[in-house]
Image (cartoon, grey):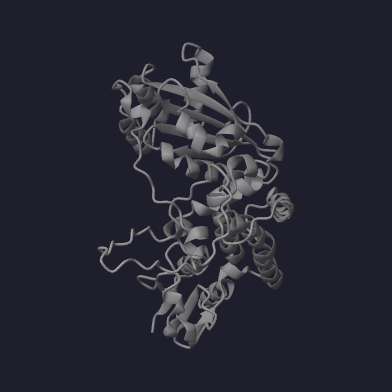
Amino acid sequence: MALVLHAGNTNKNGFKALIAAEYSGVKVELVKNFEMGVSNKSPKFLEMNPIGKVPVLETPDGPVFESNAIARYVTRLKADNPLFGSSLIEYAHVEQWIDFATLEIDSNILRWLIPRIGFAVYLPPAEEAAISALKRALTALNTHLSSNTYLVGHSATLADIIMACNLTLGFSRLLTKKFTSEFPHVERYFWTLVNQPNFRKILGEVKQAESVPSIQSAKKPSQAKEPTKPKDEPKKEAKKEPAKPKLEEAVAEEEAPKPKAKNSLDLLPPSKMILDEWKRLYSNTKTNFREIAVKGFWDMYDPEGYSLWFCDYKYNDENTVSFVTLNKVGGFLQRMDLARKYAFGKMLVIGSEPPFKVKGLWLFRGQEIPKFIIDECYDMELYDWRKVDITDEDQKERVNQMIEDQEPFEGEALLDAKCFK
């Protein structure tokens, strides 16, 4: 018998087990046509969980309910699973952060959200308390992540999976950019995780809330009876209203994506520079890089259709741990994926000892940094940006050196060089 997860396909608590399964190589099937409020009230479901809570995992040895327990069960199906850490103390820390994600993060997000969307009575003092408690928790999390890429160790664990799933509800429904900007390390951590392949396969694209939901009155069950109509009056068909979402969907389901407007960069006059041709030349050049790739770049470059930009990380004094710095840059490049059609970039991590410097060179379609990139990729504001003056030979040579990954660069060793193409 296969493992079958009973939950809707937008249930963030169900996502925990599904992501753990991806990391563990375990097959978990999501039950088809699950309808919250119907499927979880069926006799079969109530045999598995008498109180009808979602999710439930159906296993050969019997059902398991409570989402964290399900995620732990799936994780333990792989022997010596690194999702539980590599030592006894790491295992304890994984459990510690799972409890923190549940009791300090998830509970306070729900205390803030549920009254606003009408599933509990809205009380301003209660909301203030929930927001205060959530900020306190995020401050503690932000402090921990200031010197750690992940919650435990140097790779994702079950604690990160559960934390990210709980944060997904907050980021997508409540936590606007203005709110989360107070916690930059939490932002970096969250967007890095949800863009990793095993997360993205289950979560899809996560978009941050643009506003906090407006307050709705608490929903009450209808008790009104259908009015009696005269016998000779033709029976009118009752006007059907679209079904209101159940609580699960209300707190976990994203709105259907709207048709995307045409990107303004596609409306620019055609450019003689074919970006994909430059990317192929860059990728295929293995020797004589300066003579072939760098020269080829300037032969292709169209200063009317494209612009070059230097960027310098504003907070290099924080870059005291090499792997954290490298992951920070890697996360930035992942989040720039939305610009792949319109950009090429080089990011250099410089220095043989901390603090490490992060500098970059970017080629963008158009004469300015595209607004949609600034709006969508929060990392952009972490850098100082300066447009390259290609009439200045010193700046032009600096471009050559960054394309080429020249070492030493500006008198210092290169720790790493990453390319966005």
Classify 234 as above or below 339. Answer: below
Classify 76 as above or below 210. Answer: below
Residue located 56% across and 43% down the image: 211
Q: Nearer the viewer, residue 381 or 102?
A: 102
Classify 12 as above or below 259. Answer: below
Task: Determine which quarter of the picture holds residue 226.
Answer: bottom left
Res. 271 in view: yes
Percent coordinates x, y for residue 357 in the rendering: 64, 34
Q: Nearer the viewer, residue 52 or 190?
A: 52
Residue extending farthest to the bottom is: 61
Residue 366 horizontal side relative to residue 230, left or right: right
Q: Nearer the viewer, residue 133 or 383?
A: 133
Residue located 35% across and 35% down the image: 261
Residue 373 horizontal side relative to residue 350, left or right: left
Residue 264 horizontal side relative to residue 101, left or right: left
Q: Nearer the viewer, residue 255 or 84?
A: 255
Residue 399 horizontal side relative to residue 135, left or right: left
Total numbered circles: 0
* Figure quadrant of the C terminus: top left
Percent coordinates x, y for residue 231 in the rendering: 28, 69
Res. 322 in view: no
Residue located 49% across and 43% down the image: 335
Percent coordinates x, y for residue 246 in the rendering: 47, 64
* Figure quadrant of the N terminus: bottom left
Percent coordinates x, y for residue 309 in the rendering: 50, 24
